[in-house]
Image: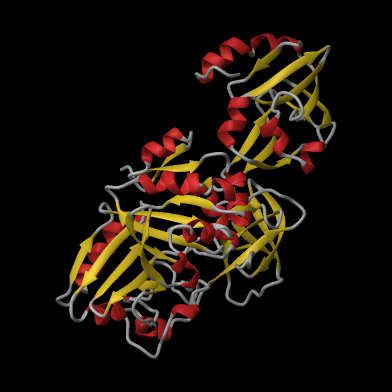
Amino acid sequence: MRTPFFENHVKLGAKIVDFHGWNMPLQYSGILDEQKAVRSNVGLFDISHMGRFRITGETSEDCIQNLITNDISEITENQAIYSPMCNEKGGIIDDVIVSKISQDEFLIVVNSSNIKKDFEWIQRHLDGNKLKDETQKVALLALQGPKAQAIIEKQTSEITKLKPFHFMKAKLYGQDCVISRTGYTGEDGFEIFFDSSNSILWEKLLSDGQIFGIKPAGLGARDVLRLEAGMMLYGNDIDEGVTPLEAPLKWTVKFEKNFIGKNALEKNNPQKRLVGFEIVGSKRVARLNDQIIYEGKNVGRVTSGTFSPTLAKSIGFCYVPPYMQFGQDIQILIGGKNYDAKLRSTRFYKK
Amino acid sequence: MTEKRFTQDHEWVELSGDIATIGISNFAQDQLGDIVSIEFPEINSKFKQKDAMAIVDSVKASSDIYCPMDGTIIEVNENLEEHPELINKSPYDQGWMLKLKVSNISQFENLMTQQRYEKFVGEAKG
């Protein structure tokens, strides 16, 4: 599948890769160059491959409350919330962002790898409400970085009042959009939803962003940025074999309300724990499923690894036994050789 | 200019007497993307042709560097430990990786010429 901006990516010389059935840009000028643009100026990402579902109906809020572990009643209209969606065993089906449009209308953004699975799961728990897959109908761009607001501000001065995890309707270059102050980079920034039949926004944002040092950024930079910011990647760091209590997502589980998987999570005795690591004395990069070695034994595995330009270190996430604490010295087996590493918080980068 | 020969694993070799200078091709660095580290073998270690002798990590992938000819490592480009990006920026010059004292010079003749290598990777630039 192609997003409405596929031709734009090709024209910019992007390296295109298959990502869960979508032809997506991996990189344009280079992963490190794009990562730097987002941390110091601003980057533009095409994230139209992410799934978008609309749930409407009188009891749609109850339906969502049942589906997610976080508490939807904590937000009001024009706000969004991050949450895992669990199965009865407490395993994570997906991690999603739910936007409350009104009392009886919600938009859920899901991972592109899970669109079919999530749609079927939600449909089974609709309880008379309506579910629509709008992935193809709605385009989605992310404008991320400290200069992101300056670009949007030229179109709508109201943007300066928009708080994190809030969204608003606005016109950008004459185009009706919904802009939310959310992202997957650890920087200030926006995610912009609009009708996918109109794709001028990509070019307009890039040309208006020139004076702020904007760069188009691909999936490669997005992965480095989210890892530095301690954000989970579904399929690598979390999946149905993991509970939110084993991942660092305990803060999203609200036991004072009801949700699918609550009983299992109340009894959950975590067998493993996802933490961050940094490699000490080498810049070799650990990759998915590299073993964590402690006192000569294999005690866990790497779920994500990369080189962090911000820290100038090789970093990543791994599962280790729950008794292991931050600061613990371990080793990681990379390509048949052990490398010294230290466990630490997943939040490598804080703005 | 000294003649470069290439392997199917995308290393290049320049020979001066029995000393081979080794790096990776422009095509290889472009495929790997931003290189962030290189791990060298010990000086004086011996390798056979096609033995893995060094490892480069880019942001997205790890890749072995294979020895293009039989020989002994006599020098590594230590500058790359601080500046691995030189492999991307200057693969044929400042991004050279290792020097090898070769034990079988005739192996050079069996490596691909630049022209053949370019045909092999199917791109105009070497």
Type of colouring = secondary structure
Q: Residue at x 71, y 49 (%)?
A: A283
Instruction: Look at the image and tell me in which quarter the N terminus of chain A lies.
Output: top left
Name which residue lies at 58% across and 15% down: B117
Could you say which is closer to the camera, residue B112 or residue A333?
A: B112
In the displayed structure image, the side of residue A174 where residue B108 appears, left or right: right
Count numbered badges in the picture: 0
Occupied quadrant, residue B66:
top right
Can the viewer see residue A288 in this picture? no
Residue located at (81% from left, 33% from top):
B77
In the displayed structure, B97 sits above or below B38; it is above
In the displayed image of the protein, which residue is found farthest to the left? A128
* Front one among A275 and B44: A275
Quadrant of the snapshot with the C terminus of chain A: bottom right
Q: Position of residue B91 (x, y in %)?
A: 69, 27
Q: To which quarter of the image does residue B33 belong?
A: top right
In the rendered image, the vertical position of residue B16 relative to residue A272, given as above or below: above
Q: Which residue lies at the image location 67% right of the left edge and 52% below the top edge? A: A309
- Residue A177 position, x and y percent, is 34, 59
Q: Is residue B40 left or right of residue A113?
A: right
- Residue B52 location (% of width, % of height): 67, 32
User: On the picture, is A347 further left or further right than A270?
Assistant: right
Q: Is residue A269 visible?
A: yes
**Percent coordinates x, y for residue A21 in the rendering:** 34, 45
